[in-house]
Amino acid sequence: MRSKTPGPRRCVLMYLVDTNVVSEARRGTREAVAWLRSVNSSTIYLSVLTLSVVMKGVALKQRADARTAGHLAEWLQKLRRGHADRILPITDQICIRYGPRGDIDGLAAATAIVHDLS
């Protein structure tokens, strides 16, 4: 007779990926590409902060190299499409958690905490 007791619950890690990880993967950095390929893409989340940082990079690059800025803007759109259901906003709950951290990394950390991401 089989036991009716359920087995152990399987925990799925989900990740809030920082701008530097997606940027390094775009550049083809081996470690970033390998890590992103090693995890299920549905477990990878982005913060709106990442999109903001990339957009700032596009704007800064536009002044010196419009062609490269165009490529970066296209990449930003691909990020947005590829993660459309996994882009996390900054909410009031995140701002309350953010507290005294005073920088963009603190907001990102609070986002991960609030959404229970690694």
Image (spheres, rainbow, N blue to C red):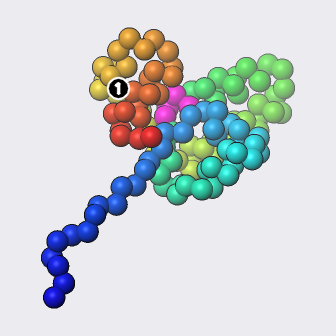
Look at the numbered disc 1 and give the secondary structure of its residue: helix
Q: Residues within 10 Å of mark 1 (few under 14, many from 20)?
A: many
Q: Position of residue 62 (x, y in %)?
A: 77, 24
Indicate the quadrant containing the C terminus: top left, top right, bottom left or bottom right: top left
- Residue drawn at the location 64% of the way across and 40% of the way down: 22
For the residue pair 60 and 42, the one nearer the viewer reads as 42
Indicate the quadrant containing the N terminus: top left, top right, bottom left or bottom right: bottom left
Q: Position of residue 116 (x, y in %)?
A: 35, 40
Question: Is residue 50 covered in magenta?
Answer: yes
Instruction: Give the main secondary structure, helix, strand or loop, of the magenta stretch.
Output: helix
For the residue pair 8 and 38, the one nearer the viewer reads as 8
Q: Above or below — where is 75 with respect to 1? A: above
Question: Is residue 14 covered in magenta?
Answer: no
Q: Is residue 51 visible?
A: no
- Residue designated by label 1: 94
- Residue drawn at the location 75% of the way across and 43% of the way down: 29
Q: How many tags in the picture?
A: 1
Q: Is residue 55 visible?
A: yes
Q: Above or below — where is 51 with respect to 95? A: below
Q: Residue furthest bottom?
A: 1
- Residue drawn at the location 17% of the way across and 79% of the way down: 3
The magenta stretch spans which residues?
47-51
